[in-house]
Image (cartoon, rainbow, N blue to C red):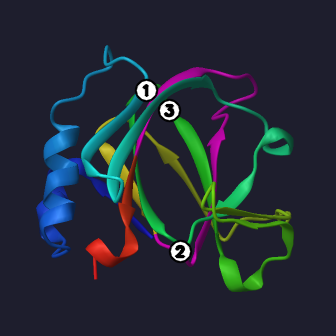
Amino acid sequence: MIADSIKNHSLYPFGPAWKAAFEFLKTLTPETEAGKRLIQDDRLFAGVDCYETKSRAAAKLETHRKYVDIQVLLSGEEVIEIFPKQELTVSEPYSPDKDAEFYRAPENAPVKTTLRPGQFLVFFPEDAHMPCLMTGSSPQPVKKVVIKVAVELLA
């Protein structure tokens, strides 16, 4: 997992796909329409989504195998809990179509962070993450972009 300010993205030596992802992010604003966008091809694309944050009981703890997630908020804020995958119990087996496996969430997350505009989080296949969580006691609207980068593009 990486958590940092977007202005520091060039400190990470992950190659051309990494650079393309952050160049794409520069084109987005809070007014950007929701939807899927190809950045290069099906190995580097983004989804812009608008939703309400949710309670921990309504959220899902997930990992991915084929893609690394770069998550950035365009507006709002949300809490994300992060767990080491190897310590978890699977609740829904891996689905290649969704590139997702889901887990039972332990009571306490070893890492809990609040994502705000101007920051990014990167989740690798070993990083189980539970996004979309409320920062307070009630749901709030957010607009988020998740860039999917095929694992082999960052190797």
Cα separation, mark 1 vs mark 2, equals 24 Å
Circle 3 Cα neighbour tier, 10 Å, few/some/many (<14 / 14–19 / ≥20): many
Q: Mark 1 vs mark 2: which is more N-terminal? A: 1
In the rendered structure, does residue 137 fall within the stretch colored magenta? yes
Q: Which residues are magenta?
A: 124-146
Q: Is residue 43 above or below residue 155?
A: above
Q: Quadrant of residue 146?
A: top left
In the rendered structure, does residue 8 fall within the stretch colored magenta? no
Residue 106: x and y, percent? 84, 67
Q: Amino acid at mark 1?
A: Gly
The tag on residue 77 is: 3
Q: Mark 3 vs mark 1: which is more N-terminal? A: 1
Would residue 86 be found to the left or right of residue 29 on screen? right
Cα separation, mark 3 vs mark 1, equals 19 Å
The residue that mark 1 highlights is: 35
The residue that mark 2 highlights is: 125
